[in-house]
Amino acid sequence: MIRHIVMWKFRPGTETEQEQFLDGLRGLQGVIPQLRASQVARSVGADNYDAVLVSEFDSLEDLEAYKRDPRHVKVSALCKSIRIDRVAVDYEI
């Protein structure tokens, strides 16, 4: 199994788009078959990244298929338009 963690910092003034993006990510669970589990949350701490995705896949190949899925690509495009920074890590569990 692969755990995929992504965190984002968003541009100020994009709060509506941020919610659309996070809701879009949540909506991928149960829709993209390779996505085994996911959690999407906002940070509660100051001076942290704004939001996080923690997701699980059976393999790196499944993670890559998820990234290429048109439904994920659409959600990701919105994120790219509002983010300041992004960090990610993938590891075996």
Image (cartoon, rainbow, N blue to C red):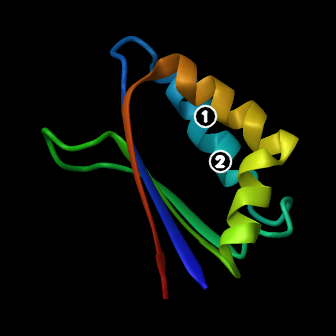
Kind of residue sitting beneath label 2: Leu
Q: Residue at x 39, y 11 (%)?
A: 13
Check disc 1: other Cα within 10 Å, few if <14, some if 14-19, many if 20+.
many
Residue bearing mark 2: 25
- Dividing the picture into quadrants, the one containing residue 74 is top right
Kind of residue sitting beneath label 1: Phe
Q: Position of residue 68 (x, y in %)?
A: 79, 47
Asked whether 91 or 21 is in front, the reply is: 91
Q: Position of residue 78 (x, y in %)?
A: 63, 25
Q: Position of residue 88 (x, y in %)?
A: 42, 53
Q: Residue at x 71, y 50 (%)?
A: 67
In the displayed structure, would residue 85 be above or below residue 15? below
Give the spatial CA distance, label 2 vs label 1: 6 Å
Q: Position of residue 28 (x, y in %)?
A: 76, 54
Quadrant in which the N terminus appears: bottom right
In the displayed structure, would residue 34 be above or below residue 85? below
Tell me whether circle 2 and circle 1 mark residues in contact (CB < 8 Å): yes
Identify the mark at residue 21; answer none if there is no mark. 1
SS under mark 1: helix
